[in-house]
Amino acid sequence: MVEMHLIAVRVELPTNTPVVLLQEVGGAERTLPIFIGTPEATAIAYALQGVVPPRPMTHDLMRDLLIVSDVEVTSVVITELRGSTYFAELNVRQLDRLYTVSSRPSDAIALAVRIGSPIYADDDLIDAEGVWLSHEDDDAMLSGSADDLVDQFRAFIEEISPEDFSTGA
């Protein structure tokens, strides 16, 4: 396992796709870019900025449920990439019992940011998918802020209609 540090949530240009950047702690400092949805990116960015919403967001609710259930998230592990989809696991402890729970990386990261759990990536995954980003590469490829993500999400919500979810049957 390679310990990772969440360094940023950005928007990749020109596609305006949110990406979370996890960087290897120590060692080669490779970066694992994981493309995620706008709502998840907003949730992570809010937590990073310490934004407290008037009502709990989903990941805040999840954190609160874990706390009242006396469940500790001991770590988040980004486990693999299948096709273009990343997979993750939450390692949790309740009293003396250990559990592993499957998760989307974006949800696992959003929760880890809220509770301070360490984030890891599988050795083989970081060897295969980790990249070295210079500051110039980072600035040239990525831009955006939490406000940009929120604005994009609001635009998405305003333009969507119930018909967008129909199956066409």
Image: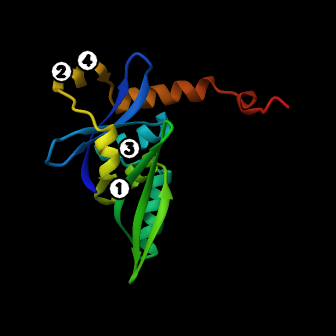
Between circles 2 and 1, the one closer to the viewer is 2
Quadrant location, the N terminus: bottom left
Whole-percent x and y of residue 19?
A: 38, 33
| Location of mark 3 (residue) | 44
Q: Secondary structure at mark 2?
A: helix
Between circles 1 and 4, the one closer to the viewer is 4
Q: Secondary structure at mark 1?
A: helix
Between circles 3 and 2, the one closer to the viewer is 2
Whole-percent x and y of residue 49?
A: 29, 42
| Location of mark 4 (residue) | 140
**Amino acid on which disc 1 is placed:** Ala
Query: Which of the two discs, 2 and 1, labels the residue nearer the N terminus?
Result: 1
- Horizontal side of 23 relative to 62 (left or right) equals left
> Marks 4 and 1: in contact by CB < 8 Å?
no
**Amino acid on which disc 4 is placed:** Ala
| Location of mark 2 (residue) | 136
- Horizontal side of 154 relative to 29 (left or right) equals right
The relative height of residue 144 versus residue 124 in the rendered view (above or below) is above
How far apart marks 4 and 2 lie (CA) works out to 6 Å
Whole-percent x and y of residue 22?
A: 29, 42
Query: Which of the two discs, 4 and 3, labels the residue nearer the N terminus?
Result: 3
| Location of mark 1 (residue) | 112
Query: Which of the two discs, 1 and 4, labels the residue nearer the N terminus?
Result: 1
How far apart marks 4 and 3 lie (CA) works out to 22 Å
> In percent of the image, x 40 and y 69: which residue is there?
92
In-front residue for pair 52/116: 116
How far apart marks 1 and 4 lie (CA) works out to 28 Å
> Marks 2 and 4: in contact by CB < 8 Å?
yes
Query: Which of the two discs, 1 and 3, labels the residue nearer the N terminus?
Result: 3
Q: Secondary structure at mark 3?
A: helix
Q: Secondary structure at mark 4?
A: helix
How far apart marks 3 and 2 lie (CA) works out to 24 Å
